[in-house]
Amino acid sequence: MPYDLIAVGLNAVDVLVRLPETVRHDDKQFVDDLVIQGGAPVGSGCCGVARFGFHVGMVARLGRNTLSSICLEDFHANGVDTGLVVRDEESRPAIALVEIDHRTAARTVFIQMDHYGYLRREDIPNAEIAQARALLVDSYDLDATEAALKAAAGSACRSIMDFESGDPERLKKLLGLGTDAILPLAAARALSGLREPGEVLHALEDWCPGQVVVTDGRHGSWALDRDSGGLRHQPAFVVEAVDTTGCGDAFHAGYIVGLLEDWPLELRMEFGSLLASCVAGRVGGRTALPWRKDAPSMARRETSPALANKLSTLL
């Protein structure tokens, strides 16, 4: 059966701890919130899509070690197909230590990538990508990203790009290969040299032939509406944040679910914002991702009637 979504990008294990009000250095302390789970933008994004019942595959190079086992078990628990994983005894995922501020929910991330399993061109499932409905890529392994985007080019596969950093000229080139660019506003500002969301989006539009979106946490997201030619703003949903890890990944997941359900741009953006608010309420980027069965109960007071109606039909 063809994949609804194939994900190609960074694969990681997150160790997350919500720091207590007072940290006693050079001592031991008990904490209430300490979570170990799979992480990284593409990894968590594809889990969010899989939870809504879509056939999702993750492309990764993993070995036979503890970190790899955690990744595989977490993918299975989230409904992600691991048939595209390449087994390599020498490889392991990245490991990220995430410290969460109990007052602001902001996180500080320390990443270690020794023996990371970087994908090779022969690992990219070209035929499967060309037959898939969507592709999700990031900017952590640009050789793999480029190969995957080229595999999708010329097919009906929508390619969603989540670029946080990297060589600017290469990123601009890669933007030209995809159909949907969803970048953090800070990354898009660095790439364009501009500041206002509208100006930044117009710059991205010069490089990406498809839909362009920028996200900015509690300030929401913006997109150029190609149908109307106007600037569309989606406010963030108000939430008492516990941990902001994975909020951007959840936005991508909601946007992709909307794509697969053939929703218009405004509902894709709103659902992405709604998923991000769900994730912010718990420690860990995957902990509070909803399942398809939860969709009818996800609507809030500020949810638009159009999205509420769509959610009621997802069962």
Image (tube, helix red, strand yellow):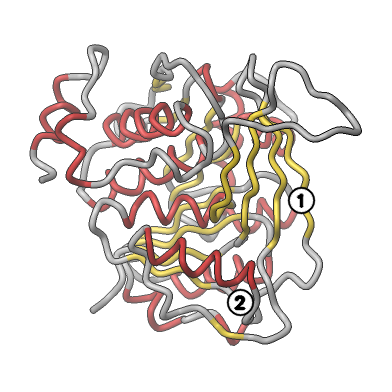
Q: Is residue 38 left or right of residue 52?
A: right
Q: Position of residue 108 (x, y in %)?
A: 73, 33
Tag 1: Cα neighbours inside 10 Å, few (<14), some, or many (≥20)?
few
Q: Secondary structure at mark 1?
A: strand
Give 215 or 19, whichever is nearer the viewer: 19
Label 1 to label 2: alpha-carbon separation: 17 Å
Q: Quadrant of residue 114?
A: bottom right
Q: Secondary structure at mark 2?
A: strand
Q: Is residue 260 left or right of residue 122?
A: left
Tag 2: Cα neighbours inside 10 Å, few (<14), some, or many (≥20)?
many
Of the image marks 1 and 2, the number of the one nearer the N terminus: 2
For the point 38% across and 49% down, which residue is it? 48
Q: Amino acid at mark 2?
A: Leu
For the point 53% across and 40% down, which residue is it? 284
Q: Is residue 240 left or right of residue 202?
A: left
Q: Quadrant of residue 56?
A: bottom left
Q: Is residue 126 left or right of residue 93?
A: left
As displayed, is residue 256 above or below residue 224?
Answer: below
Where is the C terminus found, in terms of image quarters?
top left
Q: Position of residue 122 (x, y in %)?
A: 59, 87
Task: Give the residue at mark 2.
Answer: 62
Give 229 or 224, whichever is nearer the viewer: 224
Q: Position of residue 232 (x, y in %)?
A: 39, 22
Give 277 or 153, whichever is nearer the viewer: 277
- State the count of labels: 2
Task: Give the residue at mark 1.
Answer: 111
